Image: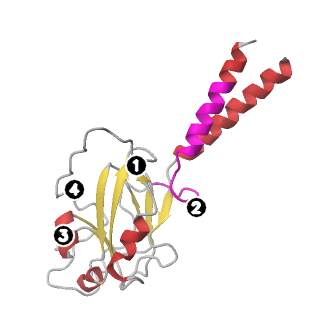
Amino acid sequence: MVQIRNVSIIVVIIAVAVLLQSTKAEEYIVGGDIGWTSFPPGGASFYSKWASNFTFKLNDILVFNFESGKHSVAITTKSKYKKCDMSKTTPFLATGPARVTLDHKGKFYFACTFTSHCRSGQKLKVKVVTHSSPISSPSSPKAPPEEVYCPPLPSGLVPIPPSNEGTPSSSSSSSTVPGVIAPPPPPQTGSAMTLPVTFSLLLINIAFHVLLQF
């Protein structure tokens, strides 16, 4: 009896550990081994196809690997993303690798501030959900407004010089967005899955009923 009870307790501990592991924030290297670059292989659809392989959730982190001075990362709006319009009010990160935390639900739009690079396919759109996978609902979700996310210019970021498609201003030396960048988590393991969560809850339920018999 004592052995069975001890085994049940161990099962609960393992299940809780798996549950916590499956719900933690993930880190994603944008573009994988290719990184964040202009004229990516596969053309303008390269980063869209890369993003379609994952389910991004709150507090996940995107890492943009690029050579400082040759590329940058701008957090922009849907309309500017489509037109590759990197106006002077667009905040950007000019030092790689740049880390951005997905700190709210909805869509994020990213692009390189070099206009020619954006048009070559160096832009990314991701959708953030609150769970590891979207929960189906009988009613259709409301479409987000066009101007989904365009944060104010934080400290450490610089505006793009007017009428200049060259190298971003050298005064931008920060590669992180203050207030939204998290400490480095463990290496990417892919998108979080719901299977470990379901399995953990099942183990906890079984162990709980076993313990009730004592």
Residue annotated with mark 3: 80
Mark 1 and mark 2 lie on one chain; the one further toward the N terminus is 1
Q: CA distance from mark 4 to mark 3?
A: 11 Å
Q: Is residue 111 magenta?
A: no
Q: Tell me if residue 169 can be seen.
A: no
Number of other residues with Cα within 10 Å of mark 2, as a class: few under 14, some 14 to 19, many 20 or more: few
Where in the figure is residue 4, as x and y percent of width and height?
81, 23
Seen in the picture, residue 133 relative to 9 is either above or below; the reply is below
Number of other residues with Cα within 10 Å of mark 1, as a class: few under 14, some 14 to 19, many 20 or more: some
Residue annotated with mark 4: 148
Q: Amino acid at mark 1?
A: Leu
Mark 1 and mark 3 lie on one chain; the one further toward the N terminus is 1
Residue annotated with mark 1: 58
Q: Report which quarter residue 30 is drawn in.
A: bottom left
Q: CA distance from mark 2 to mark 4?
A: 29 Å
Q: Amino acid at mark 3?
A: Lys
Mark 1 and mark 4 lie on one chain; the one further toward the N terminus is 1
Mark 4 and mark 3 lie on one chain; the one further toward the N terminus is 3
Residue 187: mark: 2
Q: Amino acid at mark 4?
A: Val
Number of other residues with Cα within 10 Å of mark 3, as a class: few under 14, some 14 to 19, many 20 or more: some
Q: Residue at x 37, y 48 (%)?
A: 129
